[in-house]
Image: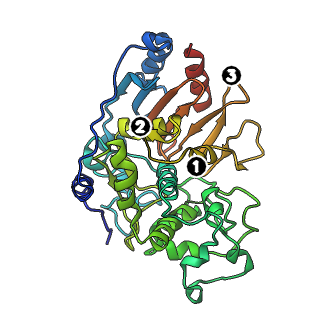
């Protein structure tokens, strides 16, 4: 049985009540591109290309500069028609143990929006948000040093394939995707050999991951692993005594005025910190804007500036390929294609979820999409360059 969280709106009300105050209301100001120094023709051309279907199933484009929304476009897609045949087939994207549930990626009741509403699946952008929650907990003194070995939070007599390398895995290694576990997520998710598919088909994601054999010494190489991110929900609760969703509701979402979200749970009940969060694009943008503002919102510190800077500092190379992004603490760090010594701070989620902060342009851009079966996709690096050049 799939475990679902308390409806987020209800949880938000409980949190606000327990805190004795409602979150401060916030509405993004709006303006024209020209008034904030953006070339409107560039945004209009992107909008025209998306509307024409050049980049497949793009659902949303949101552009914010200097804290002001200058373009917000939603594109209607008929996902019953687009993925109807796939919904009734069997594949690793159509989860066999619960075909009507939230891990069937062709089911339009769950994807790309929650119950066909306005909350869009973020997929692996959830990893970045989970890192931000950890940052909020570190700021408040509620979370341990990230150099703590993760096995502190397990009964090691129950952990399979235990060796000295596994004993050396730290929280920092999980945050930088360098835990060293045997994991192959570099092939398409439709491929049954993708380890993430086996993870999602398992009844206990935490046990599935912690019991994996080790492949290499922790900290030596980036290896993308959703399982390592799934472990963070377990660690967070064991370390703080609080469910990571509840902590996010109190100490990240509430200060930003985010009152509506959905966060899937795994079959064993833990929050899906590898890919289960749904947010509306304007609310997702608040987290990226928070990072641009050094962790402060409405004059208060939500995440301390040191964590903000550390989390978007390159800690490990994701590839030896020229131009490949670097990786922070669950943040993808792309070189600025115009100013090579500058960075773009991004999240990246299956299907085309791309929230991005351009710190040197004071700009946040969010793309939501649902390109999951080989459709044309957004040429991310080219779009980043166009957006940067559009900023005066």
Q: Specify whether residue 105 is in view.
A: no
Q: Secondary structure at mark 1?
A: helix
How many residues crowd around disc 1 within 10 Å: few (fewer than 14), some, or many (20 or more)? many
Which circle's residue, 3 or 1, is located before the other in the chain? 1
Residue bearing mark 1? 307
Asked whether 387 or 391 is in front, the reply is: 391
> How far apart in space, not on screen, are marks 3 and 1 (Cα)?
27 Å
Disc 1/disc 2 C-alpha distance (Å):
17 Å
Q: Quadrant of residue 227?
A: bottom right
Residue 5: image quadrant is bottom left
* Residue position for label 3: 338
Look at 58% across and 30% down and name the residue there: 359
Q: Colour scheme used in the picture?
A: rainbow
Q: Quadrant of the N terminus?
A: bottom left
Q: Is residue 353 left or right of residue 15?
A: right
- Which residue is denoted by mark 2 in the rendering? 299
Q: Is residue 268 above or below residue 119?
A: below
Q: Earlier in the sequence, mark 2 or mark 3?
A: 2
Number of numbered discs on residues: 3
Foreground disc of the pair 1, 2: 2
Residue 28 x %, y %: 34, 28
């Amino acid at each position: 049985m799939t475990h679902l969280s308390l409806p987020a709106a209800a949880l938000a009300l409980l949190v606000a009540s327990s805190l004795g105050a409602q979150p401060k209301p916030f509405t993004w100001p709006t303006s024209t591109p020209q008034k904030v120094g953006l070339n409107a023709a560039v945004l209009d051309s992107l909008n025209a290309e998306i509307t024409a279907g050049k980049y497949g199933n793009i659902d949303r484009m949101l552009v914010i500069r200097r804290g002001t929304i200058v373009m917000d476009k939603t594109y209607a897609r008929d996902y019953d028609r687009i993925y109807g045949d796939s919904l009734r087939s069997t594949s690793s994207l159509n989860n066999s143990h619960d075909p009507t549930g939230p891990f069937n990626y062709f089911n339009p009741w769950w994807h790309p929006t929650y119950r066909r509403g306005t909350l869009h699946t973020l997929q692996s952008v959830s990893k970045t948000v989970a890192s931000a929650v950890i940052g909020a907990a570190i700021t408040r003194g509620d979370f341990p040093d990230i150099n703590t070995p993760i096995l502190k939070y397990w009964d090691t007599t129950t952990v399979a394939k235990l060796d000295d390398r596994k004993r050396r895995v730290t929280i920092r290694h999980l945050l930088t995707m360098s835990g060293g576990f045997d994991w192959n997520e570099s092939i398409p998710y439709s491929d049954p050999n993708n380890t993430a598919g086996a993870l999602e088909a398992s009844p206990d994601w935490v046990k599935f991951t912690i019991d994996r054999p080790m492949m290499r010494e922790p900290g030596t190489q980036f290896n993308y692993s959703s399982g390592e991110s799934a472990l963070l929900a377990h660690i967070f609760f064991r370390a703080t005594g609080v469910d990571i969703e509840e902590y996010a509701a109190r100490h990240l979402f509430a200060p930003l005025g985010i009152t509506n979200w959905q966060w899937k749970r795994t079959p064993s009940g833990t929050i899906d910190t590898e890919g289960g969060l749904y947010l509306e694009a304007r609310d997702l943008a608040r987290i990226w804007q928070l990072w641009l503002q050094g962790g402060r919102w409405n004059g208060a510190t939500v995440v301390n500036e040191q964590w903000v800077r550390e989390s978007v500092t390159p800690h490990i190379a994701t590839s030896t390929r020229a131009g490949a992004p670097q990786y922070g603490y669950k943040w993808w760090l792309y070189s600025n294609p115009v100013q090579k010594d500058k960075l773009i701070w991004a999240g990246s989620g299956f299907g085309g979820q791309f929230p991005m902060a351009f710190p040197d342009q004071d700009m946040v851009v969010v793309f939501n999409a649902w390109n999951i079966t080989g459709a044309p996709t957004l040429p991310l690096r080219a779009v980043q360059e166009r957006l940067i050049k559009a900023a005066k």
